[in-house]
Image (spheres, helix red, strand yellow):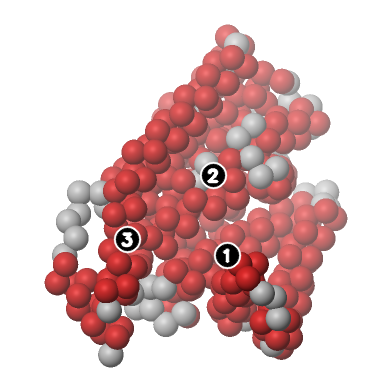
Amino acid sequence: MRAERRLTIQPITLTHRLFGPIVISVAVGACVYAGAVLWSGSSATIDAASKVGSVAIFIGAAASSSGYLARFLRWHLLLRWLGYRLPVLFNLRVYVAGLALTTSPGKVAETIRSVLLLPRGVSIVHSLAAFFADRLSDVIGVAILGATAGCIVATRNVGLEIIGAAALCLSFIARAVMRSGCCTRRIKRVPGRIGAWLTRIHTLVTAWAGLWTLPRALICAFCAFVAFGIQGCVFAFFVDLSQVSLPSAQCVAIFASATLIGAASMIPAGLGATEAALVFQLMNFGVDATTAVALAIITRLVTLWCGLLLGSVTLLSFVPARVDRRAIDTVSGGREQ
């Protein structure tokens, strides 16, 4: 009984202790990015950015942020499929709060949502399984987005098609292996700490395998398609305002490719890698360097840093909350029964 209470209370304490380092990490990341922008920028780049205008940037930020609703819908559905019925507004707060840690490699630190959901009875195994499905469907959805946009402008990107198909096929091969039970027998033979860690990983992947069916995978990928498609359209909007003659579908394909390159780099939030991919592809289509840099910076400000700011403010809302000991006792008692 006591051990169960400690498991329930610890994540709430952990949130308080980690909030300071979280704020510092976000602030440092923002300062480094701002410094890089100032270092690489020039008067010509600033002039190129001014063609877009502050009003258009604000509209782009609002439109880009609306894409988080599609991603939240996916997150909410994943938890419902796992059997959890959470209040929509509370779950939205939890999801948005995780955006504060987008600058971690592979967005792994966004798993702080598991900490915030644990007091509501959501097991860490299940929330991590939902996170894994969330990230996997991002890869599939963005690859489909880029491939579709490329086909529209008759510049087929075979690489994106391969990435999307491979991610989908390999995920179902892994699912079949996990559900066959062959891994369970092998892991039980591994002794010591290594065996214990493999058992934990196996439990997590098994939970994901039970969640990852073809209809659900397609729904999750579609949510990613919509969310990143909105951001790609925002990028196309900025390109058009910069008086660059480039089809909107081509801009979306460029944005999708750059997003996957940034994710593959494993650099926190793809900082530098995504921007470089955007600039390189724009220049490959004849856009001058100063305009390409300005477009990359503006696009990342509204598609990345606005989300970080929104997530940081939302995460702050969890910190002052006091722990209701009676509620914890009730949850613990209910589990024991």
Quadrant of residue 217 within the rendered picture: bottom right
Q: Which residue is farthest top?
A: 43
Give the mark nearest the N terminus, 2 or 1: 2
Residue highlighted by disc 1: 132
Question: Dot 2 surroundings within 10 Å: few (below 14), some, or many (20 or more)?
Answer: some
Residue 182, above or below 137: below
What residue lies at 64% left-to-right and 40% top-to-bottom?
267
- Measured as percent of width and height from the top left, residue 215 is found at 61, 80
Q: Amino acid at mark 1?
A: Phe
Q: Is residue 58 visible?
A: no
Q: Is residue 7 above or below residue 39?
A: below
Mark 1 neighbour density, 10 Å: few (under 14) some (14–19) many (20 or more): some
Q: Position of residue 133 (x, y in %)?
A: 58, 68
Alpha carbon distance from label 2 to label 3 = 23 Å
The answer to which of marks 1 and 3 sits earlier in the sequence is 3
Residue 276 drawn at (x, y percent): 70, 31
Q: Which residue is mark 2?
A: 104
Q: Marks 1 and 3, how far apart in space?
A: 23 Å
Depth check: give the residue in front, 249 or 175. Answer: 175
Q: Residue at x 20, y 75 (%)?
A: 329
- Residue type at the position of mark 3: Gln
Q: Which mark is residue 10?
A: 3
Image coords of residue 63 (percent x, y): 45, 46
The residue nearer to you, when weighing 132 against 13, is 13
Quarter that holds the N terminus: bottom left
Which residue is at a point 28% across and 45% down the rendered structure image?
316
- Pick the residue in front: 254 or 87: 87
Q: Nearer the viewer, mark 2 or mark 3?
A: 3
Q: Nearer the viewer, mark 1 or mark 3?
A: 3
